[in-house]
């Protein structure tokens, strides 16, 4: 696996730590170590990024993890693990960030579902835009929300895919929506992906829950 060129764009160390811990939770310590070796990230074996908000975890490192998952487990297996890691990433940590802190308040809990989504989805986007170099915007349409990542770490440096590959982002959104909505599952489809040659990575979130 050839290393992805460093991007000079960063997640805070804390996000890198969360992602690696989530992968370890999903695949075990040995599985994660094998992935880190394959991804050219052996410096993180038994040595996770520090738990701080310094921007030092390069987007290329996030992308390399996704490529290694696909190489080791095949497209389907890699997709499943990336989705699960994305969900674990949100469940373990992101819900504790400031922009989402009010979502557990009683005033929020009693809001109608669509109002929760209208507040919660932009709040998720805001965490990334504020704390990292991942610029994210949200647009509301009649039956869906369009969640757009303008500089996407999940597929950074990839341009040869024949299908969208940002499964970690999809899993993170699914879990975030579940939490914001009080337990509903939503359909999230990646409709554009930089790895396929699109200018941005775009995710379509249906307003009506699946359950």
Image (cartoon, rainbow, N blue to C red):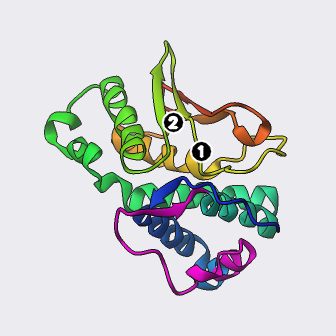
Secondary structure at badge 1 equals: loop
In-image side of 209 versus 194 (left or right)? left
Residue found 66% across the figure and 76% down from its top: 36
Q: What stretch is highlighted in magenta?
A: 33-59
Residue 136, position as x, y percentages in the image: 48, 36
Vertical position of residue 142 compared to residue 205: above or below: above
Residue 76 tag number: none
User: Where does residue 67 sit, x and y in percent of width and height?
Assistant: 74, 61
Residue wearing tag 2? 186
- In this picture, is 75 found above or below 112? below
Nearest the viewer among 156 and 211 is: 156
Q: Residue at x 70, y 55 (%)?
A: 79
Element type at marker 2? Answer: loop
**Residue 76 part of the magenta-drawn span:** no
Say if 177 sits above or below 19 in the image: above
- Residue at point 56% right, 47% down? 169
Magenta-span inclusion, residue 36: yes
In the image, residue 26 sits, relative to residue 200, either above or below, namely below
Q: Quadrant of the N terminus?
A: bottom right
> Is residue 159 shown left or right of residue 199?
right
Of pointers 2 and 1, the one earlier in the residue sequence: 1
- Point out the residue furthest to the front here: 8
Give residue 198's quadrant in the image. top right
Q: How crowded is mark 1: few (under 14 residues within 10 Å), some or many (20 or more)?
A: many
Q: Which of 149 and 167 is in front in this view?
A: 149
Q: Which mark is residue 152?
A: 1
Quote the CA–CA distance across marks 2 and 1.
22 Å
Residue 55 position within the rendered picture, expressed as x and y whole percent measured from the top left: 43, 60
Q: Nearer the viewer, mark 2 or mark 1?
A: 1
């Amino acid at each position: 696996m050839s290393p992805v060129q460093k991007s000079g764009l960063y997640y805070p160390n804390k996000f890198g730590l969360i992602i690696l811990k989530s992968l370890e939770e999903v695949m075990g310590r040995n599985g994660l170590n094998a992935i880190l070796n394959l991804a050219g990230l052996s410096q993180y074996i038994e040595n996770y990024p520090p738990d701080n908000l310094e921007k030092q975890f390069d987007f290329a490192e996030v992308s390399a993890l996704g490529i290694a998952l696909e190489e080791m487990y095949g497209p389907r297996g890699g997709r499943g693990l990336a989705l699960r890691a994305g969900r674990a990433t949100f469940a373990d940590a992101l819900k504790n960030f400031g922009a989402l802190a009010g979502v557990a308040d009683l005033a929020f809990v009693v809001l109608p579902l669509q109002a929760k989504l209208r507040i919660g989805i932009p709040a998720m986007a805001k965490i990334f835009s504020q704390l990292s170099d991942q610029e994210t915007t949200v647009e509301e349409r009649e039956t869906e929300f369009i969640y757009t990542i303008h500089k996407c770490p999940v597929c950074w440096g990839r341009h040869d895919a024949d299908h969208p590959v940002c499964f970690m982002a999809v899993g993170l959104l699914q879990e975030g929506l579940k939490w914001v909505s009080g337990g509903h599952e939503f359909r999230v489809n990646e409709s554009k992906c930089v790895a396929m040659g699109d200018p941005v990575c775009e995710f379509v979130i249906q307003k009506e829950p699946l359950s």
